[in-house]
Image (cartoon, rainbow, N blue to C red):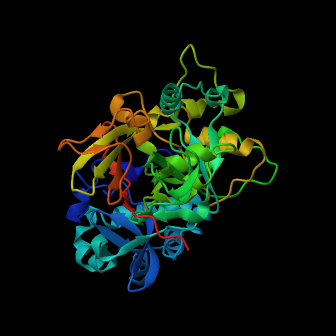
């Protein structure tokens, strides 16, 4: 079952840290996501609050925590969050509750003493929260699949409507926001032309949503149902599954390989499923012309609260300085829920392990502004994207910067965000 509401979700909560109360912040007191930062050559874990980071190492040395919250803080203060993902859920919840109290306006009398535990986010470098044990990328948007079929004049294989389609990605090339996006080399064939090898001519982004899995791991050969899939979800992030379309389209005999493996960018903060509890919504239903959900992917709780109301946007800043928000989409429009994706992946007996990263695939919705990659927006290049200043794009050019943002929203609750997921296209490196 999804997390239930508790005191940390109270919309009346305010912090004595003014930046945490700003309407535009991703990190109000109701969020408290976990991440790993680097300062003076040292990496350690912290929690985002407003424009600051709660340095858990400093907080522990100050003696403000007690009980199981202390245990979780010690784990979350490590240079990797891998052990936090297998910590008892009640200890992680206790830590969030303790932080909510310590940094709330109700504790303002101790603000000066607690100030030493805070670092400006601008003073640190965010790094990977942990090394993914595995990376699976799904294709969970019916709107994306249908549009791609229409553009290529090829009917999608019928399996897309009965199971969450996915491929196993390259975990070693997942990197945090801000990592340069180096244009890869590979084989591709221009329309009507012969195969050639060189720098990718069709660089694209894919707006995706991701989830980190917690423990315990499932056993080899053990099927996983939807309820177990829900229990495995620790927290979420943003994902840009950068796509070398020329390479991808040429190599697609067994599925994506070099067209996807050169880099996947994630936002570095892990927003816990507990923090996301107010923003759970019903899973997407099925229309009369769509197959019913198979029994092994059907779960009453998932149908009621398996989705997430998370608004996604994509901002493009071109190499010549043109700026525009070019995509507005929502995770709630996905054809499959996160728990269904995990249930399908584990249904054949493949182990699901703490530290696994899964992504939803392109989060495209039914609206025109919800086309969540350039190949979809430009209809395979037939209709170039034109920015407000007249700049045209069919695919990304060197020097272009793509940045994702997201906001989880619900009536009567404080919105929370995920931080940036951003990258700049860099020229291909010379081959040796």
Residue 89 occupies quadrant? bottom right
Q: How many marks?
A: 0
Q: Residue furthest bottom?
A: 40
Does the image show residue 204? Answer: no
Camera-side residue of 220 and 187:
187
**Residue at left offset 48%, top offset 54%:** 200
Camera-side residue of 52 and 171:
171
Q: Residue furthest left?
A: 389
- Residue 402 point in image, percent of width and height: 35, 53
Camera-side residue of 70 and 291:
291
- Residue 288 point in image, percent of width and height: 56, 13
**Residue at left offset 63%, top offset 31%:** 299
Looking at the image, residue 182 lies above or below residue 75: above
Q: If the image is split into quadrants, where does the N terminus sit?
A: top right
Q: Residue furthest top?
A: 288
Does the image show residue 320? Answer: yes
Camera-side residue of 142 and 336:
142
Q: If the image is split into quadrants, where does the C terminus sit?
A: bottom right
- Residue 282 point in image, percent of width and height: 49, 31
**Residue at left offset 56%, top offset 39%:** 139
- Residue 315 point in image, percent of width and height: 30, 49
**Residue at left offset 47%, top offset 73%:** 66
Q: Is residue 254 left or right of residue 65?
A: right
């Amino acid at each position: 079952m999804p997390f239930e509401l508790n005191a940390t979700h109270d919309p009346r909560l305010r912090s004595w840290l003014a930046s945490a109360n700003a309407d535009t912040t991703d990190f109000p007191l109701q969020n408290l996501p976990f991440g790993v930062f680097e300062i003076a050559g040292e990496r350690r874990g912290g929690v985002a609050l407003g424009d600051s980071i709660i340095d858990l190492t400093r907080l522990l040395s100050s003696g403000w925590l007690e009980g199981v919250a202390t245990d979780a803080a010690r784990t979350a203060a490590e240079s990797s969050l891998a052990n936090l993902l297998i910590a008892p859920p009640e200890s992680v919840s206790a830590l969030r509750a303790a932080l909510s109290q310590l940094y709330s306006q109700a504790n303002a009398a101790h603000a000066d003493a607690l100030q030493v535990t805070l670092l400006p986010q601008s003073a640190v470098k965010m790094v990977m929260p942990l090394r993914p044990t595995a990376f699976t990328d799904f294709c969970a948007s019916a709107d994306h699949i249908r549009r791609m079929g229409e553009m290529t004049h090829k009917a999608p294989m019928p399996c897309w409507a009965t199971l969450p389609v996915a491929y196993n990605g390259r975990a070693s090339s997942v990197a945090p926001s801000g990592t340069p996006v180096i244009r890869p080399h590979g084989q591709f064939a221009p329309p009507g032309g012969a195969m050639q090898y060189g720098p990718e001519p069709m660089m694209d982004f894919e707006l995706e949503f991701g989830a980190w899995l917690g423990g315990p791991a499932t056993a080899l050969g053990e099927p996983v149902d939807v309820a177990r899939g829900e229990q495995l979800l620790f927290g979420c992030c943003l994902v840009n599954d950068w796509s070398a379309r020329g390479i991808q389209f040429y190599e697609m005999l067994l599925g994506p390989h070099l067209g996807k493996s050169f880099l996947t960018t994630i936002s570095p903060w892990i927003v816990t499923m507990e923090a996301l509890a107010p923003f759970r919504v019903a899973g997407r239903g099925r229309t009369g012309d769509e197959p019913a959900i198979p029994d092994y992917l059907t779960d009453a709780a998932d149908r009621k609260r398996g989705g997430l109301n998370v608004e996604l946007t994509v901002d493009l800043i071109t190499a010549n300085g043109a700026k525009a928000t070019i995509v507005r989409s929502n995770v709630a429009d996905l054809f499959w829920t996160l728990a269904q994706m995990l249930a399908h992946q584990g249904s054949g007996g493949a182990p699901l392990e703490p530290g696994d990263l899964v992504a939803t695939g392109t989060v495209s919705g039914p609206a025109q502004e919800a086309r969540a990659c350039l190949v979809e927006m430009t209809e395979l290049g037939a209709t170039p994207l034109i920015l407000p200043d007249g700049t045209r794009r069919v695919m990304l050019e060197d020097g272009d910067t793509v940045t994702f943002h997201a906001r989880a929203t619900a009536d009567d609750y404080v919105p929370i965000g995920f931080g940036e997921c951003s990258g700049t296209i860099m020229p291909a490196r010379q081959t040796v």
